[in-house]
Amino acid sequence: MDITFKGVEHRYMIGTPFEKAALHPVDLSIPSGSFTAIIGHTGSGKSTLIQHINGLLKPSAGEIKVGPYTIRANQKKQSLRELRQKVGLVFQYPEHQLFEETVAKDICFGPMNYGLSEEEALKRVRELLPLVGLGGDLLESSPFQLSGGQMRRVAIAGVLAIRPSVLVLDEPTAGLDPEGRKQMLELFANYHKQFGMTTILVTHHMEDAAKYADQLVVMNDGGVEMSGSREDIFKQTERLLEIGLDLPETVRFLQQIKDQFHLKEVPLLFETDE
Ligand code: ADP
């Protein structure tokens, strides 16, 4: 499903002394079937932006279109049930949302909530477990007896079990070591390759964005600073550096990919102006 943001603004705590404009008017298109990475400083508005895609947050102005669904500012009484069935959202530390007695029940919760019988839901669970790297022997275990990595995979399977057309991942590798991070991202990359759903990954790792995404969105100070194909964005080296995205890591990374993306000169780290 194509996703478009038109003039979307978001203010938190409207009418209080703490009112905060977290998104300035955002215009953005995310192509259907793409693997899009959203990068930007902490506080640049990435989480706020993506929570509009399944209606968890309502825009203070503007509209968001997700396939045939439209969410507008000031729209009263809107059923989001169908939209939420289409957009799967994996939060940071999704394992904190596990709550059922067994792994099977936890993964079945979403699809059964959307009307699948227990039998059909269990069939999905059995298909999903190998895809998320879990053994079938864990089905009757309590999710709370599993390792942190396994718990996260159970929580992710719970989101995949609704078979979303759009999968939104908010820093799904937070807290994982480099090997765990790689395995988790390979899982999403394989899933995207196999099922082709629009996948949106919020990350602050430039190299993950470069490795897995075909489209990039760069956020800065509540606005979309740049968006486009990975190649087009990385070619704008100077602008990327101006935004100062995690500068040492960015420079080091741009040096590494210089030849692959035919980049112009990339400044050396710690180079002085003399
Ligand atoms: P990011 O995901 O890029 O770190 P966020 O979308 O979380 O950025 O935050 C954008 C801005 O909105 C920040 O200034 C943040 O402090 C503020 N913000 C986020 N969530 C809330 C909230 N629930 N209430 C008030 N302000 C918030």
Image (cartoon, rainbow, N blue to C red):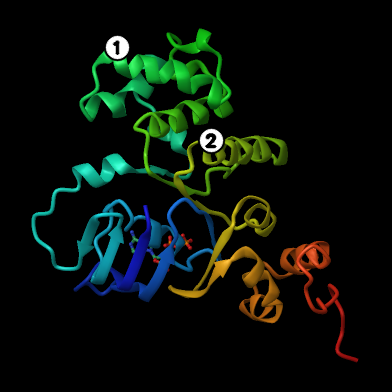
In this rendering, position of residue 125 left or right of residue 209:
left
Estimate the x, y position of residue 84 in percent, counting from the top left.
27, 43
Residue 160 in picture, x, y percent from top left:
42, 33
Q: Position of residue 217 (x, y in %)?
A: 52, 66
Which amino acid type is marked by label 2?
Gln
Left-right relation of 16 to 5: left
Horizontal and vertical percent for residue 79?
Answer: 14, 48
Asked if the residues shown at circle 2 and circle 1 are in contact, with their CB atoms under 8 angstroms apart, the answer is: no
Give the residue displayed 23% in from the left and 70% down from the top: 60
User: Separation of disc 2 and disc 1 at Cα?
Assistant: 24 Å
Residue depicted at 87% across the width and 84% down the height? 272
Q: Report the front residue among 266 and 273.
A: 266
| Observer-nearest of 34 and 216 | 34
> Helix, strand, or loop for circle 1?
helix
In this rendering, does residue 228 appear at all? Answer: yes
Amino acid type, label 1? Glu
Q: Residue at x 39, y 14 (%)?
A: 102
Task: Give the quarter the ligand 1 occupies.
Answer: bottom left
Foreground tag (2 vs 1): 2
- Which residue lies most toward the left here? 77
Classify mark 1 as within 8 Å of ligand 1 or not, answering yes or no: no
* Residue ID at (38%, 15%): 123
Sequence-wise first label, 2 or 1: 1
Residue picked out by circle 1: 119
Looking at the picture, does residue 58 appear above or below residue 274?
above
Q: Nearer the viewer, residue 27 or 146?
A: 27
Q: Which residue position is annotated with label 2?
A: 194
Label 2: element kind: helix
Q: Quadrant of the C terminus?
A: bottom right
Instruction: Tell me which corner region of the image, top left, top right, bottom left or bottom right, holds residue 267.
Output: bottom right
